[in-house]
Image (cartoon, coloured by chain):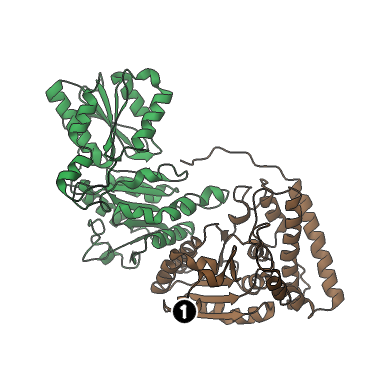
Chain colours: A green, B brown
């Protein structure tokens, strides 16, 4: 059974066969192999180009950017995504700007992988989903694989085929999850559709995309929760949900969402981060502005409460969005 | 640049080009020919010519907000920099970057203090991995020594044997703050603490600085290791424009030691005058050219 972490680890092995690829991060050498084991085996096989770094996120992300501008294809691992904030200046004022600011004379093909998300009891500074703070930075792409995509293949495309800087958000809880296999246009009890693009969006339907009562949009770690909510909605309320799971949250392909809304006319957008100024706010704003006529009720936004993420599980569960929250949003009038 | 210049004439011509470029720039600012602000290098010209003349075409230079002297020595293209400062589409980066965000061949600048240190280190590291033989030189100032990312970069440059030359131009003032108010301890020991060969020189003499840097540059290239060198100098102009609150007598005291007359007195007066007249003509032509250039259009891009 392949899992998200196995898929990423295999892709990393394949990527490092390319002499332009270098991999930098904290504690990535064997036998430890990185905090979440995506790096397992890499330093043994590619000792020259797997470089363990000091605890200096801004420094090594900036160094990788310099390498990217001189023909390398660096991949950087941020052990806990929360630490991305330490690299915010390098990303905002350097990496995201160089290409356009230098009149398209350079490219910065860097991939910054970050383990994100909570539900593991790591507390306020090791559980966040901070990607929303990077959504407003022109010049970067933000990808978020899920078990419904092929995470390894996304990573390979981002590293070798994309000349733009990419933030690659890996939900921690997702690492050990089995990849969701599709066969004959089905994924479990759902019909599945995938957009034909480099960073595909997955759409799931209980009713072969004929009709739907609600469109639930979710990415990364929220994808499986959204699917669970869709199952509950079907069983308990006979509500047909379609679940839209983009792998690229910036830029976001709105077409699959709009196509689903034409059937459902009801929108629920989910994210694990707190809702204020979040990804969901952006999606809802955009849909409401451009496709107001498609909505028959107010769009719903599911996300964390405006608190730091507590260490204790009883509080963490209350703060982070749960399946029930998606369910409630979907049946709201 | 004249092919027939002696070494001393070349250094003087380059320094006079930087000086006259910026003097005209400041005059034209008051006429409204430019947008925004600018950071001049007046008084520090000897550093740029002493170092950049010794680099190869493959080598990388990463400069900062105060980049005119470095750029003009590197490129000898005053018209492109005027065009950029006037925001024209044929400027160094098409009017997108302005005074402190430019890129020309292997020359780069950015406007965040210290943020350029990792990029320069990474570039030198990449060139080492590619075995191109190129090294990187990064210019920072005394004020930038306050930034943490400088030390993250020095640490990794030393750990990973990166061929990067870090030049600290200590012009003794960070905007309006005296170096004594913003820097504790020693500058040189900051490099030494990371096991990096480090040194310092107090000079505004371009020839002396040139000779000082010859073995340093050669060593960075040969040993494929970083080096950290402090030049004690002085900024004779304001930080950007009209923001100079420094004591006048201090500025005047340093003016007696400024780099241009020092080099001029080693030339025949008639030679120096000929160089000055040539440079003034070039600068006038560069300004005239830049003024005629079109403003850029906002083009659709793949930016996301």
Tell me the residue at 36%/25% (across/down): A258
Q: Which residue is mark 1?
A: B189
Q: Nearer the viewer, residue A176 or A10?
A: A176
User: Do we see residue A184 in this rendering?
Assistant: no
Q: Is residue B227 left or right of residue A131?
A: right
Number of marks in the rendered image = 1
Check the residue under mark 1 and report the chain it is in.
Answer: B
Residue A166 is situated, as x and y percent measured from the top left of the image, at: 39, 48
SS label for mark 1: helix
Tell me the residue at 18%/50% (across/down): A120
Q: Nearer the viewer, residue A11 or B225?
A: B225
Residue B84 is situated, as x and y percent measured from the top left of the image, at: 66, 51
Tell me the residue at 31%/52% (across/down): A81
Residue B266 is situated, as x and y percent measured from the top left of the image, at: 78, 81
Vertical relation: B169 (above or below) A175: below
Q: Nearer the viewer, residue B39 or A263?
A: B39
User: Do we see residue B296 in this rendering?
Assistant: yes
User: Which quadrant of the structure image shows residue B22?
Assistant: bottom right
Q: Is residue A64 left or right of residue A244?
A: right
Q: Is residue A62 left or right of residue A118?
A: right
Q: Nearer the viewer, residue B7 or A132?
A: A132
User: Which quadrant of the structure image shows residue A40?
Assistant: bottom left
Q: Residue furthest right?
A: B270
Residue A274 is situated, as x and y percent measured from the top left of the image, at: 30, 40
């Amino acid at each position: 059974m392949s899992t998200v972490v196995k898929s990423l680890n295999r892709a990393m092995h394949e990527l490092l066969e390319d002499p332009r690829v270098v991999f930098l991060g904290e504690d990535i050498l064997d036998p430890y192999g990185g905090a979440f084991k995506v790096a397992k085996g890499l330093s043994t096989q590619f000792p020259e180009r797997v470089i363990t770094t000091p605890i200096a996120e801004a420094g090594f992300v900036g160094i990788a950017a310099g390498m990217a501008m001189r023909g390398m294809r660096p991949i950087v691992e941020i052990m806990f995504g929360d630490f991305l904030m330490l690299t915010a200046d390098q990303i905002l004022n350097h990496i995201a700007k160089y290409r356009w600011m230098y009149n398209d004379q350079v490219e910065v093909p860097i991939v910054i992988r970050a383990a994100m998300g909570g539900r593991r009891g790591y507390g306020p500074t090791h559980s966040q989903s901070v990607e929303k703070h990077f959504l407003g930075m022109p010049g970067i792409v933000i990808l978020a694989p899920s078990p419904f995509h092929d995470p390894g293949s996304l990573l390979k495309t981002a590293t070798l085929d994309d000349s733009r800087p990419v933030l690659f958000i890996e939900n921690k809880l997702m690492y050990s999850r089995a990849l969701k296999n599709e066969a004959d246009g089905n994924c479990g009890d759902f019909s599945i559709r995938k957009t034909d693009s480099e960073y595909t969006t997955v759409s799931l339907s209980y009713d072969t995309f004929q009709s739907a009562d609600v469109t639930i949009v979710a990415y990364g770690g929220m994808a499986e929760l959204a699917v669970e909510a869709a199952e509950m909605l079907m069983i308990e309320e006979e509500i047909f949900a379609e679940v839209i799971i983009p792998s690229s949250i910036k830029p976001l392909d709105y077409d699959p969402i709009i196509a689903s809304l034409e059937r459902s006319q009801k929108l629920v957008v989910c994210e694990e981060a707190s809702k204020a100024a979040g990804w969901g706010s952006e999606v809802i704003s955009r849909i409401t502005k451009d496709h107001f006529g498609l909505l028959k009720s107010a769009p719903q936004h599911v996300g964390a409460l405006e608190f730091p993420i507590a260490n204790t599980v009883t509080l963490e569960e209350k703060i982070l969005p749960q399946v029930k929250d998606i369910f409630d949003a979907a049946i709201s009038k | 640049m004249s092919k027939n210049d002696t070494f001393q004439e070349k250094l003087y011509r380059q320094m006079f080009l930087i000086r006259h470029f910026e003097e005209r720039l400041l005059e034209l600012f008051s006429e409204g020919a430019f947008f925004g602000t600018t950071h001049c290098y007046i008084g520090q010209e000897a550093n740029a010519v002493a170092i950049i003349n010794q680099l190869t075409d493959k080598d990388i230079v990463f400069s900062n907000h105060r980049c005119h002297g470095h750029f003009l020595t590197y490129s000898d293209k005053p018209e492109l920099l005027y065009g950029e400062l006037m925001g024209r589409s044929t400027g160094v980066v098409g009017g997108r970057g302005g005074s402190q965000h430019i890129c020309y061949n292997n020359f780069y600048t950015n406007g965040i203090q210290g943020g350029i240190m990792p990029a320069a280190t990474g570039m030198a590291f990449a060139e080492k991995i590619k075995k191109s033989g190129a090294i990187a030189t990064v210019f920072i100032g005394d004020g930038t020594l306050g930034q943490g990312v400088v030390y993250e970069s020095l640490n990794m440059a030393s750990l990973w044997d990166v061929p990067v030359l870090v030049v600290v131009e200590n012009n003794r003032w960070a905007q309006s703050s005296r170096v004594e108010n913003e820097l504790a301890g020693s500058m040189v020991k900051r490099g030494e603490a990371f096991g990096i060969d480090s040194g310092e020189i107090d000079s505004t003499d371009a020839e002396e600085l040139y000779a000082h840097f010859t073995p340093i540059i050669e060593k960075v290239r040969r040993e494929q290791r970083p080096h950290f060198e402090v030049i004690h100098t002085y900024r004779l102009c304001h930080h950007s424009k009209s923001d100079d609150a420094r004591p006048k007598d201090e500025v005047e005291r340093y003016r007696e030691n400024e780099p241009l007359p020092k080099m001029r007195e080693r030339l025949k007066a008639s030679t120096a005058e000929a160089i000055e007249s040539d440079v003034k003509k070039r600068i006038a032509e560069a300004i005239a050219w830049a003024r005629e250039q079109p403003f850029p259009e906002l083009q659709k891009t793949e930016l996301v």
